[in-house]
Image: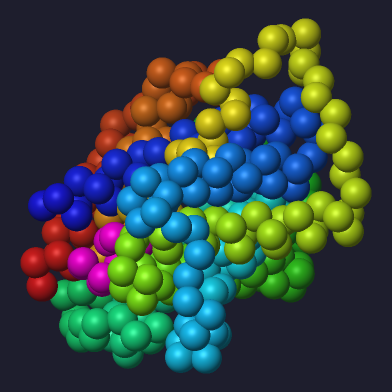
Amino acid sequence: MLAILIGLAIGVGLPMQTSINSRLRSSVGSPFMASLISFAVGTVFLGVITLIDVHTLGFSPALFTSQPLWIWLGGLFGIIYLTGNILLFPKLGSVQTVIMPVLGQIVAGLLIDNFGWFDSATRALTPIRVLGAVLVLVGVIITVAVKGWLDNRHNRIAESAEQQLATQQTALWLWRLLGVFAGMLSAAQTAVNGHLGKVLGSTVHAAFISFLVGTIGLIIIVAILHPGLKLQTPAGQSNPWWMWIGGMIGSLYVLGNVYLAPAVGTGLAVVIVLVGLMAGSLLIDQFGWFASKRNPVTGAQLLGLLVMIFGVALIRLF
């Protein structure tokens, strides 16, 4: 029960981090610079907690020879997932940018459990677990897509033939596959960091290493792209203090996943967090938190959330 509560909590925090980082991006002007600041804040936050917990930020160099190379890749997987979403949004729109990575996360999570990849405990892929995963995906689609489809049905009817042709281009499927692949890497990050936590004997230490690797990767990206740092106040608004804490929320998300993966398996960890993510997104829409536009929650979205919860129950109990 504790694992489920932790998964839901960090899932709720994820869309909050997205909203906060979006506000930070508006002020610094670059998505990569905003990501770097977010990762750096999370790294410092986890570094302090790690020093309190295990009294060191280092680890034995012997791990480089005694452990597989992939245990250090969790942070890089996180960067690819984050960058993938940045690239997908203008190509696929908000709905598919959510659904495609979610599909990848669910599929990869169940495969990791079934085959024991990344030294994970093996959990057989039963028909009931597959049904639960399908229900979770259906719930995501209902929660994310139905309201937009209903609101835009007239626009779709009036869509020009040229636009319809554009939506059928093969290139769009390549972007969709990129979204699925990015989601699969996100699930792999959960499994990798969970194993790293067992190797280091500390979930906090593992989360710190993952964030540190991600921060180094983003420093390299920013150094290549040279986006520059310019703090501005968009639309004459003042910069709120909370736009700097996205990294702290992200670090708690990674920390929670490091605990969850060995405890309940990667597949279940992924879907529990997804339920929390959808719930957090609905809360932000309903109340307009973090300077987001208010979009009242509909009955269809609540139905989608219930379908997801039922799917999680099937995966958990069977």
* Residue 92 figure quarter: bottom right
**Colouring of the image:** rainbow
Q: Is 26 on the left-hand or right-hand side of 80?
A: right
Q: Is residue 55 at least partly visible in the picture?
A: yes
Figure check: 35 above or below 24: below
Q: Position of residue 4 (x, y in %)?
A: 19, 52
Q: Left of 2 or right of it: where is 37?
A: right
Q: Work out which quarter of the rendered image holds the C terminus and state it.
A: bottom left
Can you give x and y, in whole percent of width and height, for residue 88 in the image? 68, 55
Main SS of the magenta part reads helix
Residue extending farthest to the front is 55
Q: Nearer the viewer, residue 303 or 235?
A: 235
Question: Looking at the picture, does residue 96 appear above or below residue 125?
Answer: above
Residue 238 is situated, as x and y percent measured from the top left of the image, at 69, 10
Q: Nearer the viewer, residue 270 or 34?
A: 34
* Residue shown at the point (77%, 31%) measured from the top left: 28
Q: Which residues are magenta?
A: 258-266
| Residue placed most toward the observer, 204 or 296 | 204
Residue 318, above or below 309: below
Q: Residue 208: say if magenta.
A: no
Q: Quadrant of residue 165?
A: bottom right
Residue 138 appears in the picture as rendered: no
Indicate the quadrant where residue 204 lies. bottom left
Could you tell me which residue is drawn at 45 percent across and 58 percent down?
Answer: 56
Residue 18: percent from left, percent from top: 55, 39
Q: Residue at x 58, y 18 (%)?
A: 241
Q: Which residue is pictured at 71% across the width and 34% down the height?
A: 25
**261 inside magenta stretch:** yes
Q: Along the horizontal axis of the image, is 287 left or right of 21?
A: left
Label total for image: 0
Q: Give the left or right position of residue 96, taking residue 104 as reference.
A: right
